[in-house]
Every structure is written in structure tokens, then in C-alpha cells.
Image: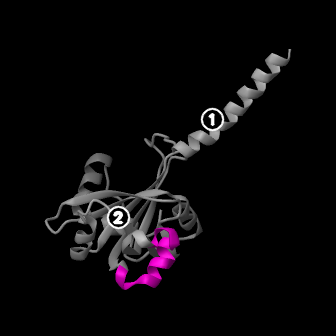
């Protein structure tokens, strides 16, 4: 666990709940910022999706799935992440929420390995038309023309979660990689039987 994650999320009601259900409240770590290390950077670069939570001006939480090629969520440096936001359903809920409240939370999953990383940050949204150089660096040439916005996220803190209760799930590519080997072996065994 990063040193300061719980400081940002602990509150009197949280400590009261801890005391009620576990007999005592956990100590609250000091305030501060956490920087992403090598493990976090490698994990983020391998993800092809994550969940982004924002807060509406009326106080409602909103969670949206973001997906792309592995590494579309860029680690610009140990304290900044970025991703290109493409044309979509035109609701722009996350974009509007960030304009009013910069605090966001990212939830990154590795279902096969049963690992999750939570990131707290403050987001800024940039109009892609006004930042073509950053679009090229973040979205790349293939996705640049589809990019409407860039999300820049200044990392406040992060936390690795335990694997308990994470059901392993696999992408079609991960399943295909395993099945391909099985198909090859079946073909070999069938050929061996025919040759007898």
C-alpha cells in the first residue's frame, strides 16, 4: 500500500465503522502524495482498460469504463497519467464532472492474475484541437484523428488491493492463445492416429 492513500479516504464515519465492526479504528497515515514506482508503471502499461470515477456537481458518483490497446493509459512520469478521449456517445459526463470537480479515482484490474490497482488523482481535460502536439504524443498517429480530448491525471495516491473475491476472467485473445496450442496438439494426435 502506498503511504498516503488511506489519509485521503479516511474520515470520522470510516473510523467509526472500523471500530464498530473490527473493535478498533485503523491509524490514519500522514498527508502527502505518492509517486508511481516501477511496479505500478509496468502494471498500468499492460492494461487495456480501466474504470474512471468522477463526482457530479450534485454529489453523485459516476463510473465509466475506458478501453483501448494495452498501454493507452500513458504513464507520463511518476506523478502524471494521461489518456486520449475519443468520440463516443456525446454525453460527456466525465468531462463535465471534471470541469466542476477535479478529483477522480481509477480502478485498474488484471482479472487473470487477480490483481487490482486503485489510483486517486486530480484530472484536467484538454481540448484536442488546441493541443495537437500532446495528442500525437498521447494518442499516437492511428488514434490522433479520433481524439476529441485529453485527460491528464495528477496522481495523488494509489493502493494495491488483495486478490480476495476477484473472479479470474480472460479476454478473447488470452483464451485464443491457450486454445491455439490445444488445437495444434489435437491436430498432431489425429494425424498420429491416422498414420497407425
Left or right: residue 147 compared with residue 186: left
Magenta span: 129-144
Extreme residue in the front direction: 145
Q: Main secondary structure of the magenta part?
A: helix
Categorize mark 2 by other alpha carbons within 10 Å: few (<14), some (14-19), many (20+).
many
Report helix, strand or loop for mark 1: helix
Tell me the crowding category of disc 1: few under 14, some 14 to 19, or many 20 or more residues within 10 angstroms, Cα based: few
The answer to if 130 sits in the magenta stretch is: yes
Task: Identify the residue position indicated by label 1 in the image.
Answer: 179
Q: Quadrant of the C terminus?
A: top right
Q: Residue at x 25, y 66 (%)?
A: 92
Q: Position of residue 31 (x, y in %)?
A: 37, 76
Mark found first going from the N terminus, 1 or 2: 2
Is 113 above or below relative to 40? above
> Which residue is at 49% across, 41% downward?
169
Work out whether residue 106 or residue 1 is closer to the camera in this orientation and state it.
Answer: 106
**Label drawn at residue 105:** 2
User: Mark 1 against mark 2, which lies toward the viewer?
Assistant: 1
Amino acid at each position: 500500500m502506498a503511504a498516503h492513500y488511506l489519509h485521503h479516504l479516511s474520515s470520522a464515519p470510516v473510523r467509526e465503522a472500523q471500530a464498530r465492526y473490527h473493535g478498533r479504528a485503523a491509524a490514519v497515515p500522514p498527508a502527502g502524495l505518492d509517486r508511481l514506482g516501477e511496479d505500478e508503471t509496468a502494471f498500468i502499461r499492460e492494461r487495456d482498460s480501466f474504470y474512471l470515477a468522477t463526482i457530479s456537481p450534485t454529489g453523485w458518483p459516476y463510473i465509466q469504463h475506458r478501453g483501448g490497446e494495452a498501454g493507452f493509459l500513458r504513464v507520463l512520469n511518476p506523478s502524471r497519467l494521461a489518456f486520449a478521449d475519443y468520440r463516443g456517445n456525446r454525453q460527456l459526463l466525465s468531462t463535465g464532472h471534471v470541469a466542476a470537480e477535479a478529483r477522480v479515482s481509477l480502478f485498474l484490474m488484471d482479472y487473470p492474475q487477480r490483481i487490482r490497482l486503485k489510483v486517486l488523482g486530480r484530472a484536467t481535460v484538454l481540448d484536442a484541437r488546441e493541443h495537437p502536439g500532446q495528442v500525437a504524443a498521447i494518442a499516437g498517429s492511428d488514434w490522433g484523428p479520433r481524439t476529441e480530448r485529453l485527460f491528464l491525471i495528477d496522481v495523488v495516491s494509489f493502493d494495491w488491493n488483495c486478490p480476495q473475491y476477484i473472479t479470474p476472467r480472460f479476454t478473447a485473445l488470452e483464451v485464443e492463445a491457450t486454445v491455439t496450442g490445444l488445437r495444434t496438439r489435437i491436430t498432431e494426435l489425429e494425424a498420429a492416429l491416422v498414420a497407425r
